[in-house]
């Protein structure tokens, strides 16, 4: 039997209120954790939750788009991988969410790391307002269970995704 040209290594999910056949990075919102990107996760529950939020906010029905990611080819990309929510990650996320500084995410095709979700928004705001130090922020993050995200930032990165269906 011949091996398929596409070697599936990972399934990724994207929660939305629509079926996405072709990703348009210009439709992706800026000022997110890893900048203007197409965000996916390995966690179907996280994608379902996001699909529900998006459908409630913008109307429509919750849809989870399913993609295969040929992880073996990511060596051809400029990838930033945050293993945990550490100081470097927190500063990176805050810079990408800022409207006042250059976004460090612009240097990468693909960024992988924890999600700065609504549960830690207060922690980030408290730091931004100068109430706590960066050390206190990072220490507070260590007690949180954070989900993961894959931010596909360029056409080259998107070329490693293949849509397989919806849930």
Image (cartoon, rainbow, N blue to C red):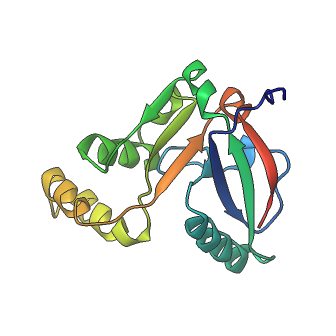
Res. 4 visible in picture? yes
Q: Is residue 167 left or right of residue 96?
A: right
Q: Is residue 9 left or right of residue 107?
A: right
Q: Nearer the viewer, residue 121 or 151?
A: 151
**135 is higher (above) or lower (below) than 120:** above
Q: Is residue 2 left or right of residue 159?
A: right
The residue under the point 69% across, 26% down is 156
- Where residue 53 sits: x, y (%)? 63, 75
- Where residue 139 sits: x, y (%)? 16, 58
Instruction: Please state, as top left, top right, bottom left or bottom right, where the N terminus lies in the image.
Output: top right
The residue under the point 73% across, 43% down is 26
- Where residue 27 sits: x, y (%)? 74, 49
Quarter assignment of residue 8: top right
The residue under the point 31% across, 61% down is 124
**58 is higher (above) or lower (below) than 83:** below
The residue under the point 55% across, 61% down is 43
| Numbered disc total | 0
Q: Nearer the viewer, residue 103 or 9?
A: 9
Res. 102 visible in picture? no
Q: Residue furthest front?
A: 1
Instruction: Please state, as top left, top right, bottom left or bottom right, where the C terminus lies in the image.
Output: bottom right
Q: Residue furthest bottom?
A: 56
Q: Is residue 65 left or right of residue 124?
A: right
**130 is higher (above) or lower (below) than 110:** below
- Where residue 89 sits: x, y (%)? 33, 44
């Amino acid at each position: 039997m011949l091996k398929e040209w596409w070697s599936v290594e990972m399934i990724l999910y994207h929660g939305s209120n629509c079926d996405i056949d072709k990703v348009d990075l210009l439709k992706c919102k800026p000022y997110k954790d890893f900048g203007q990107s197409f965000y996916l996760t390995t966690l179907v529950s996280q994608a379902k939750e996001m699909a529900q939020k998006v459908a409630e906010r913008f109307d429509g029905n919750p849809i989870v788009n399913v993609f295969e990611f040929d992880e073996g080819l990511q060596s051809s990309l400029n990838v930033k991988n945050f293993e945990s929510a550490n100081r470097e990650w927190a500063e990176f996320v805050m810079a990408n969410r800022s409207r006042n500084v250059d976004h460090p995410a612009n240097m990468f095709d693909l960024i992988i790391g924890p999600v700065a979700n609504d549960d830690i928004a207060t922690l980030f705001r408290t730091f931004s307002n100068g109430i706590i130090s960066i050390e206190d922020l990072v220490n507070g993050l260590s007690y949180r269970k954070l989900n993961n995200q894959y931010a596909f930032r360029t056409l080259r990165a998107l070329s490693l995704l293949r849509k397989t269906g919806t849930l």
